[in-house]
Image (cartoon, rainbow, N blue to C red):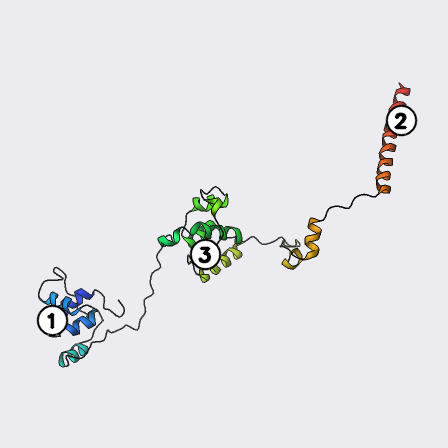
Amino acid sequence: MSNAPLMPKATAVWLVDNTALGFDQIAAFCKLHPLEVKAIADGEAAQGIKGMDPVLAGQLTREEIEKAGNNPSYRMQLFESKVRVPENKRKGPRYTPVSRRQDRPNAILWLVRYHPELLDAQIMRLVGTTKPTIDAIRTRTHWNSSNLEPMDPVTLGLSSQIELDIEVEKAAKNAPKPIEGEEPQTLMPVDETTSEEAIAAAFAKPAPKTREEEEAVDADAVFANFKSSGEGDEDEDER
């Protein structure tokens, strides 16, 4: 409920017991139905709930209550504190909706394939999975490995682009630095590997040897055999 006081029913109980405000006014402030406020006043609802003073809680001022008491059509405004208390981030694995859980293996495969620098703990934070599942997908021992397709976790709604960028940046900072004087190993540009010349060179068959090259090879082999056999005859003569 937007702009509703904390513990709206407890607040309504206190306003019913301590003010002469109308049911509509209390209902509008507490974001409740007027009939629900009437049931509270009649003792049919909110039994056992202790009233909470919204003035002491800093959610309502005495001036607002007086204005509403003098004007039945006036609607009290919730007092908003100027100090914003940051929400505590929940520690533990990320919660993934049931409808998205079947997409997690595809997201893990995408992260393992396109961001191998990520640690298992980082992947677990991004998509809310477990280490055994990551190991099974990485070693292709997952029960559904044959049907998995790499899919971006951001597109699947499992993580935000900002979270992914932060984890990738952390992994890049923690990666081992190359040795001085050694050129870093990088992939060839796409233009070079997909050009017609590169494709033709990759699938080209070696050119057949000419007759002169074959005769030269045969001649070297003959002379080599002749030389080895001659050395054997000299050894026998010496004996």
In space, the residues marked 2 and 3 are separated at their CA atoms by: 74 Å
For the residues labelled 1 and 2, say whether their Cβ atoms are less than 8 Å apart: no
Who's the residue at 50% across and 59% down the image?
169
Q: Residue at x 88, y 22 (%)?
A: 235
Q: Nearer the viewer, mark 1 or mark 2?
A: 2
**Where in the figure is residue 72, as x and y percent of width and height?**
14, 79
Residue 219 seen from this side: yes
Q: Which residue is identified by label 3?
A: 153
Residue marked by disc 1: 18
Type of amino acid under label 2: Gly
Question: Helix or strand or loop: what does disc 2 sit on?
Answer: helix
Disc 3 marks which amino acid? Pro
- Disc with the residue nearer the chain's start (1 vs 3): 1
Residue 94 visible in rendering: no
Counting other residues with Cα less than 10 Å from the Cα at mark 3, is it few (<14), some (14-19), or many (20 or more)? Answer: many
Quadrant housing the N terminus:
bottom left
Tell me which residue sits at (10%, 67%) in the image: 41
Q: Could you say which disc has been placed on residue 230 in the image?
A: 2
Q: Is residue 13 left or right of residue 203?
A: left
Number of numbered discs: 3
Quarter residue 39 falls in: bottom left
Q: Which mark is residue 217?
A: none
Residue at position x 85%, y 30% in the image: 225
Q: In this orientation, which residue lies closer to the viewer: 118 or 103?
A: 103
- Looking at the figure, which quarter contains the C terminus? top right
Residue with the most extreme left position: 42
Residue 23 shown left or right of residue 82 in the figure: left
Above or below for 225 versus 121: above
Please state the horizontal and vertical placement of residue 43, each as a whole percent of the image. 9, 63
Mark 2 or mark 3, earlier in chain: 3
Q: Position of residue 138 (x, y in %)?
A: 50, 45
